[in-house]
Image (spheres, grey):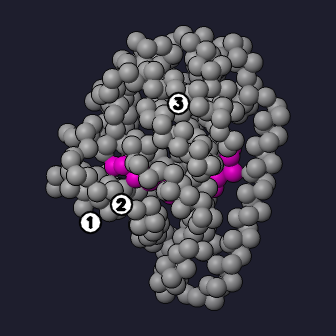
């Protein structure tokens, strides 16, 4: 199936950018950190939560549809991005999860012949253990999101949901159904309504208040909750006290400050100088920490990300979760290793696909 909203030219643009389309409205793209991890060049900052990048699927159940047009976004803001067509038919979660895992495997198959990629790393990548629901579009616009997360976790995978907070009733549904992602990220694009509007450029009314509703819901989640601040110099990297007030409202377990990167389509909207340095982020993070009592815990220079944690007790809880997941992952992996311990790689993909749910 092909997304009926996208033109052939638009589909070609996504494919040239490295996307693989799945069904009517889903897609994946191989993250550069997945490739780096396969080559033994390290993991991305999600390692802070126990994620190994070569086992991560970066996907979206809602390609192109987003109700924000963020100035810093590296994605394409194509026509029709802000409105779903009439009589829209949504794909089922099982179909999406099957499709994105298969597409991931097909896109990574070339790595099996790379001399820098070990057989073990390649096989682990064929059995992903994490799904980042964050690639493109706004995932909470997908009405079957709760069932999608349930399906992902039923496969022995963790799920990170990244939302712009514009659909709080979808988050409330996750709470009511007790279907929670492993990590819930709510991205906040400004410390006040004016800065938010200038940065996020929402196409829906009342967007700021909707985001506030989502922030208020964060404290009701039992899972990891992360307030994500994408910092753009001379745009929204201002008023740390304003961000502190939002943190006070949501009481997230973690806060991440991510420096804007001058890549993709954002290069047409912002100058290269809009990228803050890690040192600038650290100064800004200290101001937030002073205003909230949160602790600056970790930083990653390559990704220019700084993590603040609510308190040391929360950090110990996070380490406990990581160790628990590691034990679960090892047990799950022992099952497929037993099944394919003797197979040859050239025949392996067929066997791997036969054990898709392992």
What residue would you read off at disc 3?
A: 214
N-term-proximal mark, 1 vs 3: 1
Q: Is residue 12 left or right of residue 223?
A: left
From the top left corner, tell me how far across and down residue 117 is, in percent. Answer: 57, 67
- Position of residue 76 relative to residue 296, above or below, is below
Q: Nearer the viewer, residue 174 or 274?
A: 174
Quarter assignment of residue 103:
bottom left
Q: Nearer the viewer, mark 1 or mark 3?
A: 3
Q: Residue at x 60, y 10 (%)?
A: 241
Tell me if mark 1 has few (under 14), some (14-19) or many (20+) residues whose alpha carbon lies within 10 angstroms of its own: few
What residue would you read off at disc 1?
A: 1
From the top left corner, tell me how far across and down residue 137 is, in percent. Answer: 37, 43
Q: Nearer the viewer, residue 217 or 59?
A: 217
N-term-proximal mark, 2 vs 1: 1
User: Could you tell me which secondary element the residue under label 1 belongs to?
Assistant: loop
User: Could you tell me which secondary element the residue under label 3 belongs to?
Assistant: helix
N-term-proximal mark, 3 vs 2: 2
From the top left corner, tell me how far across and down residue 219 is, in percent. Answer: 66, 31
- Position of residue 307 relative to residue 234, above or below, is below
Tell me if mark 2 has few (under 14), some (14-19) or many (20+) residues whose alpha carbon lies within 10 angstroms of its own: some
Q: Residue at x 27, y 37 (%)?
A: 82
What residue would you read off at disc 2?
A: 91
Can residue 49 be found in the magenta stretch? yes
**Magenta stretch bounds:** 48-63
User: Could you tell me which secondary element the residue under label 2 belongs to?
Assistant: loop
From the top left corner, tell me how far across and down residue 257 is, in percent. Answer: 58, 28
């Amino acid at each position: 199936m092909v997304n009926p909203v996208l033109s052939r030219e638009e589909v070609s643009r996504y494919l040239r950018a490295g996307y693989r389309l799945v069904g009517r409205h889903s897609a994946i793209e191989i993250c550069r950190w997945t490739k780096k991890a396969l080559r033994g060049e390290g993991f991305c900052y999600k390692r802070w939560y126990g994620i190994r990048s070569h086992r991560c699927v970066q996907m979206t159940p809602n390609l192109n549809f987003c109700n924000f047009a963020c100035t810093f976004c590296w994605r394409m803001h194509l026509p029709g991005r802000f409105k779903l067509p009439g009589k829209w038919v949504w794909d089922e979660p099982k179909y999406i999860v099957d499709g994105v895992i298969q597409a991931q495997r097909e896109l990574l198959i070339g790595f099996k012949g790379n001399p820098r990629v070990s057989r073990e790393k390649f096989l682990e990548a064929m059995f992903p253990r994490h799904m980042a629901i964050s690639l493109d579009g706004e995932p909470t616009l997908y009405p079957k999101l709760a069932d999608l997360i349930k399906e992902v976790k039923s496969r022995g995978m963790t799920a990170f949901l990244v939302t712009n907070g514009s659909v709080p009733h979808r988050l409330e549904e996750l709470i009511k159904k007790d279907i929670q992602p492993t990590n819930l990220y709510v991205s906040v694009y400004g410390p006040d309504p004016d800065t938010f509007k200038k940065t996020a450029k929402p196409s829906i009314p009342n967007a700021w208040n909707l985001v506030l509703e989502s922030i208020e819901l964060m404290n009701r989640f039992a899972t990891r909750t992360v307030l994500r601040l994408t910092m753009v110099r001379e745009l929204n990297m201002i008023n740390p006290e304003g961000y502190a007030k939002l943190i006070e409202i949501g009481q997230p377990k973690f806060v991440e400050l991510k420096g804007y990167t001058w890549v993709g389509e954002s290069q047409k909207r912002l100058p290269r100088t809009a990228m803050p340095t890690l040192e600038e982020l650290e100064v800004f993070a200290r101001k937030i920490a002073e205003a909230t009592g949160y602790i600056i815990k970790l930083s990653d220079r390559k990704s220019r990300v700084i993590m603040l944690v609510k308190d040391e007790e929360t950090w110990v809880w996070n380490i406990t979760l990581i160790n628990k997941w590691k034990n679960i992952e090892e047990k799950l992996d022992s099952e497929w290793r037993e099944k394919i311990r003797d197979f040859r790689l050239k025949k392996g993909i067929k066997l791997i696909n036969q054990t898709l749910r392992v």
